[in-house]
Image: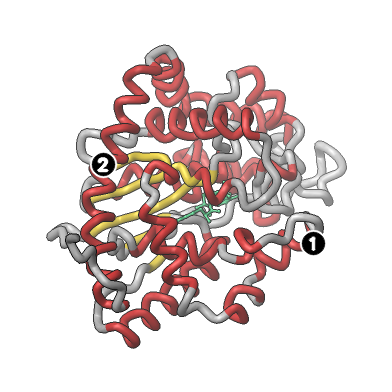
Amino acid sequence: MTKRGRVFAGIRCTGRQHLGNYLGAIQNFVALQEEYDCVYSAVDIHTITTPWEPGELRENVWETVLDLLAAGIEPERTILYVQSHVPEVLELAMLLGMITPLGWLTRVTTFKDKVRLHPDHVNYGLVGYPVLMTADIILYKATRVPVGEDQQPHLELAREIARRFNRLFGETFPEPHAKLTEAPVVLGLDGVNKMSKSLDNHIELVATPEETVERVMTAVTDPQRTHRHIPGRPEVCNVYSLHHQFNPDQVEVVYEECTTAKRGCVECKQQLADGINRVLAPFRERRQELAGRPNYVEEVLADGAARARVIAGETMAEVRDKMGLPAAYGH
Ligand code: AMP
Ligand code: TRP
């Protein structure tokens, strides 16, 4: 085990990442590199627990990896790989499946949500989503998992599965805990739901400055502020809360001017869009540069998978042994 402690996080490959992913998780992916040995994965197998298009999936894995690198993942010190390139995780997930009661899985709220959303796609793989996620994490014996608030139920289950393994087969896995950012739940442009691609209430990190302005202008603010001269209530306004992230030194001015109707929502949104564009400018520049270097990105992923497989191989040898699976007999 590493002296610095290990971090693991996966990110589904649903396409380009948005501000919610960035503020809720990716920011921490980057920051944790200072203190921990980090392993990050574009989890393509999790992505196909819901319906997908093969061609789109490949493209989306690539976009996800570019976003992570552009955000500041440093492959010299951090392991970055595509989940399916380390097939040991599938073996571990299957083995953990032998000690995970079905009842634990069917009561997970994300499972119930997906059943409602895709009633014709309620598969074995879908119900096993949290088992695969547990396997992702404990394959590397990671203790810290940078994720948004919505992943807490999955992590609770990961701890339960790890505990059960340890009880049955002897102390093997440390219990993983979520590492939240200061914005564990980022609301979308509708101002009420979690920002998410599927609700189309998001802003992509790679959006152009013009697209960013256009999207921010559609954001819902305080619904009671139906006129420019009516004072606003920043506590219920998502534009205000986003100012904390993108214009931290302006928050007090924004609050004062909004509550006294000195500023209107349009002006406030323009300032937010400017802040987002300023903060994301270096990301966008790096992203464009990386998109022009596919060979480099492929090398990073090949190297990441190779380094990950060394750790994964060690864990799997231990797991097989503890579970009583015979080692190769050598004849
Ligand atoms: P996903 O795209 O759903 O796989 O999310 C990737 C990571 O971003 C996970 O750690 C999520 O918890 C986090 N995340 C996604 N959307 C949000 C959001 N609106 N607010 C905070 N965190 C989020
Ligand atoms: N379930 C996570 C999400 O939807 C993605 C994920 C898969 C993950 N494996 C993981 C996150 C392991 C943290 C650790 O965002």
Q: Residue at x 50, y 78 (%)?
A: 100
Question: Is residue 251 at all visible to an observer of this figure?
Answer: yes
Quadrant of the frame with the C terminus: bottom left
The percent coordinates of residue 67 (x first, y second) are: 46, 31
Three-letter amino acid code of the residue under disc 1: Arg
Nearest the viewer among 173 and 324 is 324
Q: Quadrant of residue 136?
A: bottom left
Question: Which residue bears the numbered disc 1?
Answer: 116
In the orientation shown, which residue stands out farthest toward the bottom? 167
Against 37, is 290 above or below? above
Q: Nearer the viewer, residue 276 or 49?
A: 49
In this orientation, does residue 272 appear? no
Q: Position of residue 117 (x, y in %)?
A: 78, 56
For label 2, the residue is 78
Kindly report the distance in space between the C-alpha atoms of the residues bearing marks 1 and 2.
Answer: 37 Å
Mark 2 surroundings within 10 Å by alpha-carbon count, few (fewer than 14), some (14 through 19), many (20 or more): some
Tag 2, which secondary structure? loop
Name the residue rendered at 36%, 54% in the picture.
Answer: 88
Between circles 1 and 2, the one closer to the viewer is 1
Name the kind of residue labelled 2 in the image.
Thr
Task: Determine whether 90 is above or below 301 in the image.
Answer: below
Confirm or deny contact between disc 1 and disc 2 (CB under 8 A): no
Whole-percent x, y for residue 330 in the image: 17, 61
Figure check: 32 above or below 151? above
Q: Is residue 285 above or below residue 304?
A: above
Quarter of the image with the N terminus is bottom left
Q: Residue at x 57, y 56 (%)?
A: 185
